[in-house]
Image (cartoon, rainbow, N blue to C red):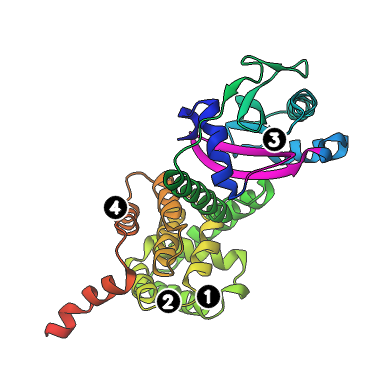
Amino acid sequence: MLDTLSGAELIGLAPYILERRPHEKLVIIGTYGGEPRAWTTWPLAALESGDTRRSMARDWATSEFDRLYLIGYSTSQSDTAARINQLHTELRDEGLETVNVTRNFVVNGRQWGYASYGGLVDGYEGTATVIAPDPVRGRVEGLLFRTSCRKRYAAARFNSLDPAAVEKAARIATQCHIDRDKVANPNRQAEIDEGRYRQALANPSAMTVLGAVALGIAAAQNVDLAADAVDDILDGAPAALDLWSEVARWSTGAARTTATALAALSAWKDRDEAAVAFAEIALDADPESGLAWAVWHVVSTGAAPEHVRACADFEAVAA
C-alpha cells in the first residue's frame, strides 16, 4: 500500500523498484486504491520538450490511476522542481480522469524535498533525509511492486474495447440469446455449443467477435461445456488462456464472469502471475458467482497445478 508511505519512505524504496539508483532521472509511479499499477523513468533533460511532456501527460492522465508520484533525482533541486511542475501543469491541462492526488518530490543524494508550484523546493527545503528500507526488505518489496504491476498490465487485456466495440458486442449478444431461444431441443443446442467450443479451442486466433460472444454465453448457460473447459485446462490445453481471455474481452454479465474465471484457471495452470488478477476481475463481474469464488480460492492457495491435477485423478486411480 504505497499510499501509506511517507515521502521519505517512498523515495527510499524507489531504487529497489527500479533495481538501480536513478541519476538525473524522473521516476513516475501510478497507483490505484493504494496498489501499484505502473512505473517509468525518463531523463530529466527530456522534460525540456513540451511535446514530450504532453505525450507523458496523455499516458498518465487516465482512469488507470488515482494517485501519481513524480520523483526527480538530480543534483540541481531547483531546476528539477521546475521541470516536474511543468509536467504537473501538462497533466492538469490534459484533464485528469480519476487522479485526485499527485505528490511531487526532488531528491539530491540522501536528501529530499517537495517540488512547489513556484519551481523551488518547499516544505522540508531539501534537508529531509531519505529513509531507505533494509536491503532484504527493499529487494522483496521491489519485487512485489514489479510483480503487482505486471499482473495488472496482463489483466488489461480484458478491458481494451472502445465504446463502439462494446455496443457491437451487446448487439451480438442480444441476437445470440434470441437464436438460443429458437432452438427447441436442448440436446441440439448442446451439440452446437460443443462444436463451437472445439473449433475455437483448436484455433483461437481465427475466432470472430460473433464466435467469442456466442461462446461466452454458451459457457455461462451450458454447465457441461464449462465442465469440459475445466478438464481441458487441467489437462494442459495450450490455447485455453488465449481463448478465454479473448472471450472475456467481448463478454458481459454472466458470460464475462464465466469466461474470466476460466481464463484465471488457465493462467494458474500456466503459472502466469496474472491469475489472481483475472480471478478478481471475475468476482468484480459477479460477486455472487460460486464459480468465480471457487477459482479465486484455487489460484490464491499457491498450490502447484500439477499436484492438483494428481488429486483430481486420485478417484480414477483408486478405482
Query: For the C terminus, which image quadrant?
Result: bottom left
Q: Which residue is mark 4?
A: 290
Q: Which residues are magenta?
A: 21-44
Q: Amino acid at mark 2?
A: Glu
- Reading the chain from its start, which is encountered first: label 1 or label 4? 1
The secondary structure type at the circle numbered 1 is helix
Q: Is residue 37 magenta?
A: yes
Residue 290 in the image: state x and y as whole percent.
Answer: 29, 52
Tell me, for residue 194, which label it has, or none: 2
Circles 3 and 1, Cβ within 8 Å, touching? The answer is no
Distance from Cα at disc 2 to Cα at disc 4: 23 Å
Residue receiving disc 3: 73
Q: Is residue 95 left or right of residue 316?
A: right
Question: Residue 313, how many percent across, how many down?
Answer: 22, 79
The foreground one among 117 and 182 is 117
Residue type, label 3: Tyr
Residue type beneath disc 4 = Gly
Q: Main secondary structure of the magenta part?
A: strand
- The amino acid type of the residue labelled 1 equals Ala
Instruction: Please tell me whether mark 2 sits on a helix, a strand or a loop.
Output: helix
Label 4: how many Cα within 10 Å (few below 14, some 14–19, many 20+): few
- Of callouts 4 and 3, the N-terminal one: 3
- Foreground tag (3 vs 1): 3
Neighbour tally class for label 3: few under 14, some 14-19, many 20 plus, Cα within 10 Å: many
> Where on the picture, by quarter, is residue 53?
top right
Residue 152 visible? The answer is yes
Can you tell which mark lies on residue 200?
1
Q: Pick whichever, 30 or 175, lies toward us.
A: 30
Instruction: Tell me the element at label 3.
Output: strand
